[in-house]
Amino acid sequence: MEAVPMPAVRLRYLGGTACTVPHRYKHNWGDDFIHYPITDAQGITQQATFVQVVGGPDPLVLGLVDNSNKVYSRPLYAEPQVREASKPHYTPEDMYAFVGGHSNQHRMDRAVNELKDVGLKAELTRYRAYKHEAERMEQRLHALAQALGRVQGELTRCKFRLEMANVLDQVTERQEAWVGGIGPTRHCGRHS
């Protein structure tokens, strides 16, 4: 089934202002455009005038609008290109192409860079970070499962030895002796 493009997706905001771009920000137009509508306190919605992408495992975008001193932020996601009903379904083999550290990673990164879509780059970064974290957690869970197995094995061996020593009968007999007036003795003073 062929993917049906979403209407009005990836439209580039070509307007802008001639004012100075704040440090580390870019005009929100052309290849740097990020769909980021911001609604101010008066209920007026406009696209962010300037944007800054903050990288990391969970990328976000900072946005500024004209005539405001507020900084807005939100997570940066890839923009949909198809309708949900007709979206493709990737197999685990397909998803391997997105993982970092494989032999063709440089080709994937180059192709994504040439698409000039910062949201797509952010989503790829996020996928790689979460994939790495999932693998790290899976290794840790495996190590914990092995440790739990060892502990449960020791518990089973302890239970066997307690049963073989017939500890419950011995303890019960001792406690019944307390009731019969023979109870535990208390020592006063210092022990020598």
Image (cartoon, rainbow, N blue to C red):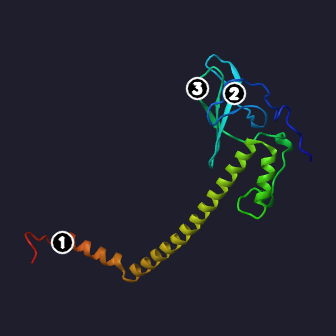
- Residue 101: where, in percent of width, then height? 71, 62
Q: CA distance from mark 1 to mark 2?
A: 83 Å
The picture places residue 8, in percent across and down from the top left corner, at 84, 31
Number of the label disc, if any, that sits on residue 49: 2
Q: Is residue 48 visible?
A: no
Between discs 3 and 1, the one toward the N terminus? 3
Foreground of the two, 158 or 99: 99
Disc 2 marks which amino acid? Thr
Residue named by callout 3: 70
User: Tag 1: residue type?
Assistant: Pro
Circle number at residue 184: 1
**Which residue is outermost to the right?**
1
Question: At label 3, which amino acid type do we have?
Answer: Lys
Q: Quadrant of residue 91?
A: bottom right
Q: Residue at x 60, y 66 (%)?
A: 139
Q: Residue at x 61, y 22 (%)?
A: 68
SS type, badge 2: loop
SS class, disc 3: loop
